[in-house]
Image: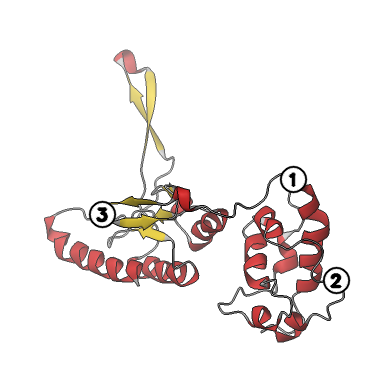
Amino acid sequence: MILRRMIPRQDLHGCVFCGNAPCDSACPRQVFPESILRSVWMHNEVCAAASLPEGNSCAGCDAPCERACVKAEKVPIRRLISRLAKEVKPCLDSVLPEDETALETDICGVWLENPFLLSSSVVASTYDKCARAFEAGWAGATFKTICAFEIHEASPRYSAIKGEGGAIIGFKNIEQLSVHSVSENLATFRRLKKAYPNKVIVASLMGRDDAEWADWRGSARKTARTSSS
């Protein structure tokens, strides 16, 4: 059992996690470094190690993947994958399932690889947070509620519920919306759909009143096109 990460993130600072990565094409042993390194970056080195074949595939290899990298020889791909094979994989207490189709489900006509989605909250408010969840196996995310009007952060985020005599008897949460603009959030949706085309993104939208209905409706249309593209 692994209780701590063995490969620090700083070892991957040179990687840009590009799509259709040249390191994948250059690997003569079909280890697929891009997805493995992305999983390590997202703190999911357990699945990265479990996806490796038995033994150290990088042993004796002259690392053409590192030379093919867009940052040639700046990312120690061979060393990182070797560490996964030698240090992480032997500590695993489970293997990757060969078939996960039993978890597939359908909600209102939307196919999901499993019934687990992030809620519309701070855990689904940025690209990195959603990507990390997708790497860990979540089927999708209901993104943090977005809107077209200016957001002012509240601090503190709780208010008191008072009873007779002014005594505090409870608290209520002050729910906040996304602090990013609609265009910024749509750009995040596009990045997520490009990197994780099989993951589901549910957009949560808010409008304040009828006067903003046109803007709200326009945002809904833009979001629907982006999330499904």
| Earlier-in-chain disc, 1 versus 3 | 1
Q: Is residue 157 left or right of residue 149?
A: right
Asked if disc 2 and disc 1 are in contact, CB closer than 8 Å, the reply is no
Q: Which residue is mark 3?
A: 206
Colour scheme: secondary structure
Q: Is residue 91 left or right of residue 186?
A: right
| Earlier-in-chain disc, 3 versus 2 | 2
Q: Which residue is mark 2?
A: 59
For the residues labelled 3 and 2, the Cα–Cα distance comes to 54 Å
Q: Under tag 3, what secondary structure?
A: loop
Give the label, 1 or 3, closer to the camera: 1
Q: Under tag 2, what secondary structure?
A: loop
Rendered location of residue 162, percent (x, y):
33, 21
Up the image or down, 82 lies above or below 160; here it is below
Rendered location of residue 80, percent (x, y):
77, 66
Rendered location of residue 196, percent (x, y):
48, 66
Residue at point 78% right, 48% down?
A: 91
Asked if disc 1 and disc 3 are in contact, CB closer than 8 Å, the reply is no
Give the label, 3 or 2, closer to the camera: 2
Residue at point 68% right, 46% down?
A: 94
Q: Under tag 1, what secondary structure?
A: loop
Q: Which amino acid type corresponds to the residue marked 3 in the rendered image?
A: Met
| Earlier-in-chain disc, 2 versus 1 | 1
